[in-house]
Image: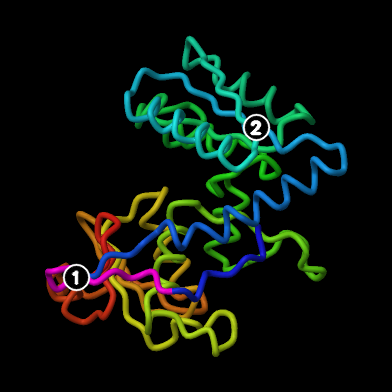
Amino acid sequence: MSSTTTPTTTVTIPSENKGTKVDVTAIAKPFREDIQRRVADLEKAGLEPPLLVGLLANTDPAARKYAEWTGKACRADGLRYELRLIDSPIDVENALNSANDDPAVHGIIVYYPIFGQVESFSGTSQDDYLRDTISYKCDVEGLCHTYRTNLYRNTRFLDYPTKNLKCVLPCTALSVVKILESIPNCYDKSKPIGRHMEGQVVTVINRSEVVGRPLAAMLANDGADVYSVDINSIYLFRAGGRLEKVSEDETPESVVRKVRIQVSNYCFY
């Protein structure tokens, strides 16, 4: 993980309505510049840039477009990217293990859905099993078992007590955190790590494994009280790993009225 911090320059753009637009390009700029500097340093030392391998085994247009944009973003910052098309979903596991074992591969991203929610002998679904098959050394999305477990335990490093290797966090949820950090009065960086959102109450609508659930945990790990709202339940995440199901009297509408920050479909209110 880069040590680059969120920029302090203005990233909010007043709009004609009561909302505020956020210039995410300005937020991303220092992180991209840091990657570009590191790639340049590697090349000066005669080393190749890191290689990200994408595995695509479906015909879903959104997944294919995501793969295209991944390649464009990598190449723009000097990283190498290789998309491997797999004819049959049943062959993904072998391709994934080959990439895990290849010392020339530095990162792996699998484009889902592959099997979707079809039941699997290996677990709840075959897609979930594949996520956990990615080695933590190659997992750039932070969704494998090692990183998920560490996130929900608020374990931020892989190598305690030296603390040189940060855990990878789920990328979309982390981008939401970085946006919140840029908005005035959301994060208080004068407080110790783990308390930057102390006193804030947040609602996150949706509890998907990719965004909603990890985002709720990340904000709670930073000190906020977070209502996690899904189709059939509402949970309250608190700092210190405390998690409780709220009273059945509570509804999405009632908890939204209690909060200062609401995250819904990647919009902030």
Residue plotted at (50% across, 34% down): 72
Please state the extent of the stretch shown in magenta in the rendering. Answer: 10-18
Q: Secondary structure at mark 2?
A: strand
In the rendered image of this protein, does residue 160 appear above or below residue 58?
below
User: Any mark on residue 80, and which?
Assistant: 2
Question: Which one is nearer the viewer's eye here, 18 or 142?
Answer: 18
Q: Quadrant of the C terminus?
A: bottom left
User: Dot 1, crowdedness within 10 Å: few (<14), some or many (≥20)?
Assistant: few
Query: Which sits earlier in the primary sequence, circle 2 or circle 1?
Result: 1
Q: Amino acid at mark 2?
A: Arg
Task: Provide the major secondary structure of the magenta segment.
Answer: loop
Q: Which residue is mark 1?
A: 19
Pointer 2 with pointer 1, Cβ within 8 A: no
In the rendered image of this protein, does residue 94 appear above or below residue 186?
above
- Left or right of residue 229: residue 185: right
Measure the alpha-carbon separation of dots 2 and 1: 38 Å
Residue plotted at (44% across, 80% down): 187
How many numbered circles are shown? 2
Q: Position of residue 174 (x, y in %)?
A: 48, 59
Q: Amino acid at mark 1?
A: Gly
Colour convention of the picture: rainbow
Q: Position of residue 104 (x, y in %)?
A: 77, 29
Residue plotted at (39% across, 69% down): 11
